[in-house]
Image (spheres, grey):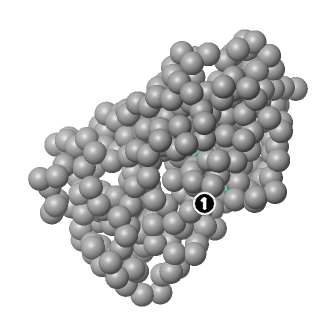
Amino acid sequence: MTAGSPAPGGPAGGGHHGDGHYGEDLFEPKHPGEAERIDAAALAYDPVTTGRLRALGVAHGSRCLDVGAGTGTVTRWLLEEPGAAEVVALDRDTGGLAGLVDPRVRVLTADLTDESLAPGTFDLIHARFVLMHLRERRAIISRLAGWLNPGGLLVLADAVEVADPQDASSAYRRVMDAMWRALKSTIGTDTSSVPAYPRFLREEGLRDVAAELYCPPLVAGSPLAAFWSETWSRMRPDLEETGLVDGAVVDEALAYLASPGFAELGPGMLMAWGRRP
Ligand SMILES: C[S@@+](CC[C@H](N)C(=O)[O-])C[C@H]1O[C@@H](n2cnc3c(N)ncnc32)[C@H](O)[C@@H]1O
């Protein structure tokens, strides 16, 4: 798997030299279609996320924190769970949460990398597809664990790719590899430590640590295919800047993604959780 591996030569030129940020140098929240892009991925993963959260249990009177809440699909689900007494929806840009009107919800506009951030203590903290985008992820996991009440659960979810080791040359593979490399070189996204999340949770002193991996079916014409198509299209200059692909390869991958013959195991989501004793 090359996803998240260091770029040998860095961007071919004019790149961000690894100091960019999510929401500023890529995936700007004001971009028309950004909420739809996030929702398209949420649609594919929400059933697994909410199924796992329900199985873990949202005890009566729980204070919950949804970290990097995005468009708030998980926050909304938590509000429907009978146990949730309060849900804090935290994001650096909370524009996608404007419609959230509930006396039990607190929308918190904050930057997770801010070391002085102290949103309170919680019985459930959930962070999906956000830590992988932040260079400070390991230190943030420590801080999140520190915000747990005794008995509280920390649930982390991020992307993992189970790439076909026999395919180094298809347009699909080359564009996916270019995407992970470009994400790393522009905003610091790195999925290489995601499989270590169970160990990180154990290092934080959490108990009952476990993890699972889910790769949703990636089918042409599905919302998830639209998510990848939109992501690649938006990143086209960054993809080409890696030097791994040119415009023709991106076009070929986009056409393949929309074709009836499309057949790939798409990126998955690793969920890891643990409980403060
Ligand atoms: C890929 S979206 C995931 C949204 C949501 N968790 C989901 O799974 O649908 C990443 C979210 O993290 C937020 N985010 C990125 N960097 C952040 C930071 N430093 N502090 C707080 N939120 C951040 C983004 O604004 C965005 O809403």
The image position of residue 28, as x and y in percent, is: 62, 62
Q: Residue furthest right?
A: 103
Question: For this rendering, which residue is in front, 249 or 10?
Answer: 10
Location of the N terminus (image quadrant): bottom left
User: Quadrant of the rendered structure where residue 231 is?
Assistant: bottom left
Point out residue 17 in the picture as x, y percentages from the top left corner.
Answer: 50, 80
Is 111 situated left or right of 236 in this image? right
Residue 51: x and y in percent read 51, 20
Q: Residues within 10 Å of mark 1 (few under 14, many from 20)?
A: few
Instruction: Confirm if mark 1 falls within 8 A of ligand 1.
Output: no
* Residue at x 11%, y 53% (from the top left corner): 166
Q: Is residue 74 visible?
A: no
Check the image and report above or below for 245 versus 13: above
Residue 266 seen in the figure: yes
- Image quarter of the C terminus: top right
Tell me the residue at 49%/34% (across/down): 272
Q: Secondary structure at mark 1?
A: loop
Left or right: where 218 falls relative to 198: left
| Side (left or right) of 261 relative to 139 | left
User: Looking at this view, is 186 or 9 the one in front?
Assistant: 9
Q: In the image as oriented, which residue stretches furthest toward the left?
A: 166
Residue positioned 80% across, 16% down in the render: 61
Q: Is residue 193 left or right of residue 107?
A: left
Looking at the picture, how far across and down is residue 95, in whole percent? Answer: 74, 49
Q: Amino acid at mark 1?
A: Glu
Q: Residue beneath label 1, please?
A: 136
Q: How many marks?
A: 1
Name the outermost residue toward the bottom: 13
Looking at the image, is 30 positioned above or below residue 59?
below
Q: Residue at x 40, y 44 (%)?
A: 195
